[in-house]
Amino acid sequence: MNGRAARNRHQGERQRIEAVLDRAARNPALLVKVIGNQEIWRRGDVAFVLPRLADDYPAPLKDAISARRRAALDGVCVCGGRRKVVSATSIEFDHTTSCDATDDRILAIGNEVGIPFRRWIA
């Protein structure tokens, strides 16, 4: 397969994934199961594994994680950032630089309030 054909195939895959996620966003979010510190949510035919929002988290951390979870489920962040399907296995968000739902801000807020995270996934 030449480079142009591969790019076209990957673009088609990204478009199909975007369409699936767009259809899923039109369905209600349903909590399926809690496993440790993660929750499995379902919207339509799509499952989302999200960090559990602990009751004892301080408000700044709760707010940041809530915004991140909502962005993952809806495809749109409160800062206006939108999801971008990068590949069949990777989705990114174009958060604003001041958005608390970014990886760096959640890690920083966690450290500020004494709840450090080793890594962030969502």
Image: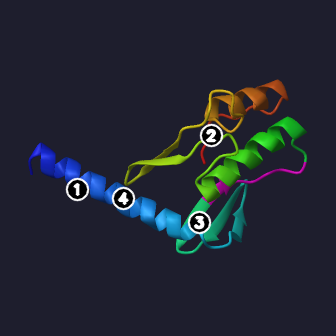
- Residue 88 location (% of width, % of height): 37, 54
Cα separation between marks 2 and 4: 26 Å
SS under mark 1:
helix
Going from the N terminus, do you reach mark 2 or mark 3 first? 3
Pointer 2 local density, CA inside 10 Å: few below 14, some 14–19, many at least 20:
few
What's the residue type where badge 1 is placed? Answer: Arg
Pair 2/3: label in front: 3
3D distance between C-alphas at marks 3 and 1: 25 Å
Q: Which residue of the protein is positioned furthest toward the left in this rendering? A: 2
Where is mark 4, residue-wise? 15
Mark 3 secondary-structure assignment = helix
Residue identifier under label 3: 25
Region of the chain picked out in magenta, as a range: 49-55
For marks 2 and 4 on the same chain, the one whose residue lies earlier in the sequence: 4
Whichever of callouts 3 and 4 sits on the residue coming sooner in the sequence is 4
Q: Residue at image x 50%, y 63%?
A: 21
Foreground label between 1 and 4: 4
In the displayed structure, would residue 49 be above or below residue 106? Answer: below
Residue position marked by numbered label 2 in the rendering: 120
Residue for badge 1: 9
- Residue at x 59% of width, y 66% of height: 25
Chain-order first, disc 1 or disc 2: 1
Proximity of marks 1 and 2: CB atoms separated by less than 8 Å: no
